[in-house]
Image: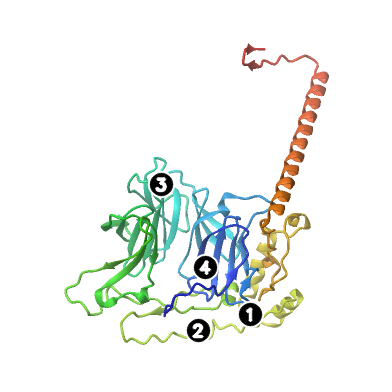
Amino acid sequence: MGSSRTSAKARKTLAGHSRRVSLIEWHPTAENLLLSSAYDYKVLLWDVSQVGAVLRCPIRVVLRPIYHRYPSEALLLSVSFNADGSRLVVTSKDRRVRVLDPRTGKILQVSRSKSHRANKVLYVNNFQMLLSTGSSPWNHRQIVLWDPEDLSKPVHEEDLDGSAGVLFPFYDPDTHILYLAGKGDGSVRCYELSAAKPFISFLTDCRSLLPHKGLGVMPKHGLDVGRCEVFRFYRLIAVKDLVEPLSMIVPRKESGIFQEDLYPMTAGNQAAMTAEEWLLGVNRGPVLMSLKPGTANPYPESSADEEVNFMKIQMDPPAVAATLKEVDLPGKAFLHEQLAYQDAKYPQEPGDLVDWQPDDTQIPLWTYPHCQEPAERPPPTTEAELLFEFYRQQNQIRELREELDQKDMKISKLEMQIKKHLPHPISIQHEGRHGTC
């Protein structure tokens, strides 16, 4: 059930990023697991069920800057989990599509196509494909389908128009319908996807005179099945700052009757597993429910072979190791493999943490060495702090310039020494502004 009242009070505050947060995405099957990405080039996983109103330590660092380098693949434009949450597909600032392992941050596939610059991407789970929207080298908006196991070349490309707005894709796996809405457009286009050619078939479009700058979606269990409503948008109108509902209704002769073909079993609102299970390598699909009115949805219990007896790990790292030795966990070997990969990827050396300040105000529920991400120095809040940071940066710039000057002098000296030891002089022609010297 959704919220029955308006509330502006935050239940949790996640204070792990030092710059503006750009994306958040809930895990599709694990309970209380949230992924966040920000302009500090960090991608973090949070367990929002941890104790405390303010959480400062994530349970997993998926991506982050290494040695003060800020790779373009870490600044995400779009994220999407697959059906069981074992894979994460992203688009980055370099406009490529990448498939990652969200538990380790390991990049599994990278697109190499030069004919498509991706903006948004999502998983088409029932066809085992990826769908991205973006632009061609000629700035035509495109839809592209990919094989998630091989991103070397697209499966299908289709040009749409020459507009400049970013296309936001929304996919309904129950009806196989793709909805495309462009930022600044006033229309929503509908396509049907299939596993065979032509892959994408145009159905219709819904036009409005008022453009939208953002859209939200109603979950499946909130639709009006009596009216044959299969999708509902909430359009944020750019002109009048209004929120307008837009319902997608399939016309049928008899209204008020539940249509079995329009509403198959769909993903429900209950998690399939806990965050601890997912961290240990357990993968489960979503728990399905029926949208037929009056139908009881008894959520199935986990099978005996998937049940894991978990213990709350205390704050002492040696206690963590002792717990893993004493308890025979099904994913223990998998967990050790993930920890080893993270430690190799992000070596914690003292020299790497010069500009970082650790935060001890909140202790995480799980204490793993690779998850103790120190919080960055907060931005200046007063004029005096701002001036101090300004002069500090000026000093750093001056020191760098002095180092460059010294290197130039060394290079000049080495060139003179090389010329002295050469047996024959070498004439060097230099084309300047007034001719050849």
Q: Which amino acid, mark 3?
A: Ser
At numbered mark 2, what does the secondary structure look like: helix, strand or loop? loop
Q: Earlier in the sequence, mark 3 or mark 2?
A: 3
Asked if the residue under mark 4 is in contact with the one under mark 3, i.e. CB atoms within 8 Å, the reply is: no
Distance Cα–Cα, label 4 vs label 2 = 18 Å
Which residue matches tag 2?
A: 302
- Name the spot of residue 358 as percent of width and height, x first: 73, 64
Indicate the quadrant containing the C terminus: top left, top right, bottom left or bottom right: top right
On the image, the x and y values in percent for residue 409 come to 79, 29
Q: Earlier in the sequence, mark 2 or mark 1?
A: 2
**Closer to the camera: disc 1 or disc 3?**
3
Residues marked 4 and 2 touching at CB (< 8 Å): no
Q: CA distance from mark 1 to mark 4?
A: 19 Å
Tell me which amino acid carries mark 1. Leu
Real-space Cα separation, disc 1 to disc 3, in angstroms: 47 Å
Whichever of labels 1 and 4 marks the residue nearer the N terminus, that label is: 4
Looking at the rendered structure, the number of numbered marks drawn on it comes to 4
Mark seen at residue 86:
4
In this figure, which residue is indicated by the disc labeled 1? Answer: 329
Q: Report the Cα–Cα distance between label 2 and label 1.
A: 16 Å
Question: Label 3 crowding class (10 Å Cα cut-off): few <14, some 14-19, many 20+?
Answer: many
CB atoms at circles 1 and 4 under 8 Å apart? no
Q: Position of residue 299 (x, y in %)?
A: 43, 84
Quarter holding residue 264: bottom left
Vertically, is 360 above or below 192?
Answer: below
Q: Residue at x 41, y 66 (%)?
A: 125
